[in-house]
Image (cartoon, helix red, strand yellow):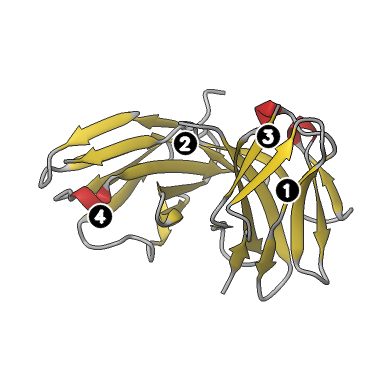
Amino acid sequence: AQSVAQPEDQVNVAEGNPLTVKCTYSVSGNPYLFWYVQYPNRGLQFLLKYITGDNLVKGSYGFEAEFNKSQTSFHLKKPSALVSDSALYFCAVRERGGTDKLIFGTGTRLQVFP
Amino acid sequence: DAGVIQSPRHEVTEMGQEVTLRCKPISGHNSLFWYRQTMMRGLELLIYFNNNVPIDDSGMPEDRFSAKMPNASFSTLKIQPSEPRDSAVYFCASEGTNYGYTFGSGTRLTVV
């Protein structure tokens, strides 16, 4: 069965510092991987995805993520955090060749302090 | 592109009443998903449709929940009778061919 783990409930970082939000996954085959962001009282917004090709994926708002097959990880990163990046971040996985449904992690709340 | 449209944005109802949530997916998207979000359980997939056909409803909590997609531009999620534990934010999402969901803004349901 597919699963996603986000080991940190909350990540705190000072504005201007680099940030990392961790995600590991488990699928029986090769994965499609996604990051979404949720601002208060809003729906989830797509940030980036890994489908194939370069393991380093660049997405919206300066975020990027690196697919690491050996470590089954897809950590979200940004070189310099902004206060406006504070939100809830979800990692999601879909098995290549499997069903259409995305399995989401439990979410990590990112708090960027001025 | 108006995105995925959900209505109502907020719903407050009394226990035992019927509740109907509505979703209009993005035109041309052939998959539609209903999720429920709570603090305790996070994001749960309730049901999804492909080309208007229900594919997987294993996440529907119990018989009080039902979902329909009568055509490509409309879906409903119905709860009857509603209970306080159904209080949550319900999201609809649709997907085309680009391997990514577009979510609606959600319906916040409160059952008192």
Whether residues under marks 3 and 1 lie with C-beta atoms below 8 angstroms apart, the answer is no
Q: Looking at numbered disc 1 in the image, what kind of residue is underneath it?
A: Lys
Q: Looking at numbered disc 2 in the image, what kind of residue is underneath it?
A: Pro
Q: Which mark is residue A9?
A: none
In the picture of the structure, the residue carrying the numbered disc 3 is A112
In three-dimensional space, the C-alpha distance between marks 4 and 1, rounded to whole angstroms, equals 32 Å
Dot 4, crowdedness within 10 Å: few (<14), some or many (≥20)? some
In three-dimensional space, the C-alpha distance between marks 3 and 4, rounded to whole angstroms, equals 39 Å
Dot 3, crowdedness within 10 Å: few (<14), some or many (≥20)? many
Q: Vertically, is B7 above or below A49?
A: above
Which callout, 1 or 2, points to the residue nearer the camera?
1
Q: Nearer the viewer, residue A102 or B13?
A: B13
Circles 4 and 2 on the same subunit: yes
In the picture of the structure, the residue carrying the numbered disc 2 is B25
Q: Position of residue A22 (x, y in %)?
A: 71, 56
Which callout, 3 or 1, points to the residue nearer the camera?
3
**Residue B43 seen from this side:** yes
In three-dimensional space, the C-alpha distance between marks 3 and 2, rounded to whole angstroms, equals 33 Å
Q: Which mark is residue A49?
A: 1
Q: Nearer the viewer, residue B4 or A14?
A: A14
Q: Looking at numbered disc 4 in the image, what kind of residue is underneath it?
A: Phe
Which callout, 3 or 2, points to the residue nearer the camera?
3
